[in-house]
Image (cartoon, grey):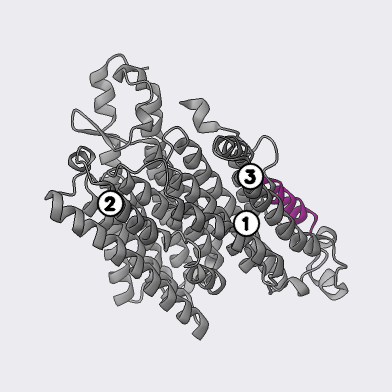
Amino acid sequence: MFSNLSKFVGFLAIYDFNLKFLLISFFIFVIAIIVGYKFNFYNTSNKILLLKNAVLFIYSTSFLCFLFYFYILVHFKSLLQISNFIFYDFTYNFLNKKILDLSSLIIVYLCYLVGFISILTLGDRFWFANYWLSVIFLYFLIIIHLLVKANSLFELFVYYELLLLPSVFFVFKSGYTKKSQQSNVYFLIWTQLGSLIVLGGIMYIINITGSSSFLILKNFNFTPLENYYLYILFFLGFGIKVPLWPFHFWLIKVHVESPSGFSIFLSGFLVKTAVYCFYKFTLVLNPPSFYIFPVILCILGVLDASLKMWIQTDIKKLIAYATVQEMNAIYLIFVLNDSTFINVGLIFLFAHGVLSSLMFFLVECIYKRFNTRNLYKIYGISTLFPNLSIAIWGMLLLFFGFPGTLKFYVEIQLCIFLLNYDFTLTFIFIFIFIFLNVIGFARCWFSILYGAPNQDKQLNNLKLDLTQEESLIIFFLWFLSVIPCFFLYLF
């Protein structure tokens, strides 16, 4: 399609063009909202929906630009004569143009995908009350584009914090009960505690090296003791945000008290950025294959969340623990610090972003029909709502790691990798991650699907099966999860 390298480099500028487009759109929206608020312009539902649809249009346009940029990287990787440049450790510069590595591409893609679904899930009623919050999603897009271009630890840290602080504000404005505000306090305190720990590690690095640049630090030799303590600082600092056991209670509280639309964004994207930043931070260190302390904490996190799924009565809390369990498993992959296995972790990161979005979206679908999330009050979905029942079964197959799904590929690769270290460890992990949590998770959903339906609900809700919009979102998320090894086949 393109004849030479100069054209290729020229087309790479679409990334910077996309960023400028988002910046201009963001400032226009801010001005429009301020002026509209002053003159009481947004006083009807039609005008508020126009604002929401404009955000979705900008999201879609920017996403198309990103997909074109992604296509160029794949199509022209041979021209750079670097067979796997897309797996490069850091953002690669070529004639002053940015070429993102695989981890950066995945995290930006998740921001687009999950943000779009979050906006749709929040629903019109939410935007009527909080229409001015629509600019926050454009803000998230801008910051993630800047974050993946960061060339230093400090710059990466600053952009990451710029992602978190508006999230706290979003929870504050979208919650209307005392419990929701309490969860927001947990959110703020624990995430900032993690930031303080990470900042301490950055300040130490700057103090002894005089720089926080990735390229300089990559060639700096830390002592084994410095490697160990810096690694633990970054592990705990970002682990609180992942969230790592036993610091995960803030996430459970936020999920339970927040709208499902924000839960989708929090679980499908925001916590993934913590893993991404941990991966980037540890690339400047020279640790051994792995440290035993982080591995033990991650395994305990998987075990704790798996056991707690057995006793939940709130389906949103159930899914919150399911996401905590999988995030600890993802964190374990990066903690094992095997360069050949990192790509599996990145695929798992993407797969879980899609799966968690699907799970929380189904929670919203159930809540709309029953006005409750209590497991003891929701029965007979298979009888009352056949289409919703099929969607739940599709989600369960993805969670179980059915053959042909991305999660199945990740689980197989993880077991093969652990077998190289110890058979007993592999057996324990399989028992906890694949057997124990699946039974606890499925037990609750089978009760919802096949319990005897309440006759009053049956009479009132027979016409409330999945809408066309809900069906399309569910099918799209399910489709993304059943393409096995999609990214690896491309590259």
User: Alpha-carbon distance for marks 2 and 3?
Assistant: 30 Å
Q: Which residues are magenta?
A: 385-398
Task: Check disc 2 and report the residue beneath it.
Answer: 225
What secondary structure prevails in the magenta region?
A: helix
Q: Tell me the amino acid under the disc marked 3.
A: Thr
Circle 1 Cα neighbour tier, 10 Å, few/some/many (<14 / 14–19 / ≥20): many
Which element is circle 2 on?
helix
Upstream in sequence: badge 3 or badge 1: 1
User: Alpha-carbon distance for marks 3 and 1?
Assistant: 32 Å
Residue at position x 53%, y 43% in the image: 348
Task: Check disc 1 and report the residue beneath it.
Answer: 359
Vertical side of 205 occupied by 135: above or below: below
Residue at position x 50%, y 79% in the image: 180
Q: Is residue 393 magenta?
A: yes
Upstream in sequence: badge 2 or badge 3: 2
Rendering quarter of residue 404: top right
